[in-house]
Image: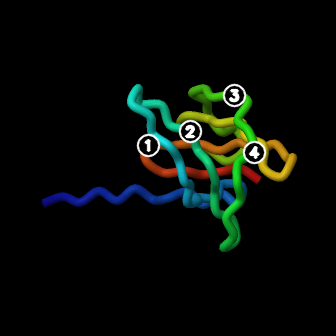
Amino acid sequence: MIKFETPEYNNPNKHYTEVKAIFDKEGNITPLSMEYDGQEFEIDRITDIRPAASLKSGGAGIRYTCFIDGKQTYLFLEDSRWFFEI
């Protein structure tokens, strides 16, 4: 059997993270908090949700424009994994 290995591109701006989210009956996903450096941070508000590419760190998916502790950040759902940009 032939096994294809896809190398993973390591970008210092792309950080995979754990996210707590709500899935409603219509299939909408709303992130509530994310983990960074061993700490959990609550998402204060979400101002935009759209399909988008991450120009800073590579990758694409559903981009959530979030405010955490008063600072804007982009949180992406790429396939079944979450990442954020720094």
Circle 4: residue type: Asp
Nearest the viewer among 78 and 13 is 78
For disc 4, the marked residue is 44
Left or right of 19 in this view: 54: right
Cα separation, mark 3 vs mark 2, equals 11 Å
Cα separation, mark 1 vs mark 2, equals 15 Å
- Give how far across and how far down residue 63 sits, in percent: 62, 35
Cα separation, mark 2 vs mark 4, equals 12 Å
For disc 2, the marked residue is 30
- Give how far across and how far down residue 36 sits, in percent: 68, 65
Give the mark nearer the N terminus: 1 vs 2. 2
Circle 2: residue type: Thr
How busy is the neighbourhood of tag 2: few (under 14 within 10 Å), some, or many (20 plus)? some
Element type at mark 2: strand
Q: Nearer the viewer, mark 4 or mark 1?
A: 4
Element type at mark 3: strand
Give the mark nearer the N terminus: 3 vs 1. 3
Give the mark nearer the N terminus: 2 vs 4. 2
Circle 3: residue type: Asp
- Write the residue at 69% across / 28% down: 48
Q: Nearer the viewer, mark 1 or mark 2?
A: 2
Q: Nearer the viewer, mark 3 or mark 4?
A: 4
For disc 3, the marked residue is 48
